[in-house]
Amino acid sequence: MSMIQFNKEEKASLVQKLKRYFNDELGQDIGQFDAEFLLEFVSKEIGVYHYNKGLQDAQDIFKSRVESVTDAIYELEIPTEFSGR
């Protein structure tokens, strides 16, 4: 997997969110350059954990849905002497 990439508009929005957070919550004014480096760090070092968690959540949902479909198919089955039920 390559590093998480954002287009120009996404990156600008995320950088502004970081700058606003630092100002509002920490009382610190960080510049554009620092905010971009922070976004790059978070994306590279922390973002992968969120990405992997999202993939795991998607797999869990998929497994649950497949099990539901499998159960529904078994419910439709008409028992015969060959069905093993």
Image: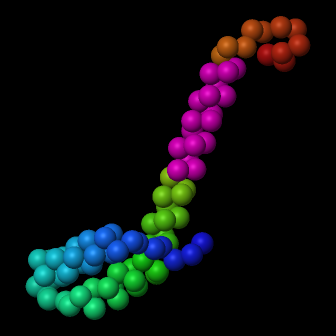
- How far across and down, in percent of the image, does residue 5 sit? 45, 74
| The quarter of the displayed image where residue 14 is located | bottom left
Is 41 rendered above or below residue 46? below
Is residue 14 among what the camera can see?
Answer: no
In reply to whether residue 68 is colored magenta, the answer given is: yes
In reply to whether residue 62 is colored magenta, the answer given is: yes
Is residue 71 among what the camera can see?
Answer: yes
| The quarter of the displayed image where residue 1 is located | bottom right
Quick one: which residue is furthest to the right in this view? Answer: 82
The residue located at (62%, 21%) in the rendering is: 72
Question: In terms of depth relative to the viewer, which is nearer, 1 or 69?
Answer: 1
Please report the bounds of the magenta region as a residue range.
Answer: 58-74
The residue located at (57%, 43%) in the rendering is: 62
Residue 41 appears left or right of 84: left
Q: How is the image coloured?
A: rainbow
The residue located at (66%, 16%) in the rendering is: 75
Residue 57 appears left or right of 25: right
Residue 20 appears left or right of 57: left
Quick one: which residue is furthest to the front in this view? Answer: 8
- How far across and down, in percent of the image, does residue 41 sit? 40, 85
| The quarter of the displayed image where residue 19 is located | bottom left
The residue located at (67%, 14%) in the rendering is: 76
- How far across and down, in percent of the image, does residue 6 sit? 40, 72
- How far across and down, in percent of the image, does residue 50 sit? 45, 66
Give the prevailing secondary structure in the magenta stretch.
helix
Image quadrant holding the C terminus, namely: top right
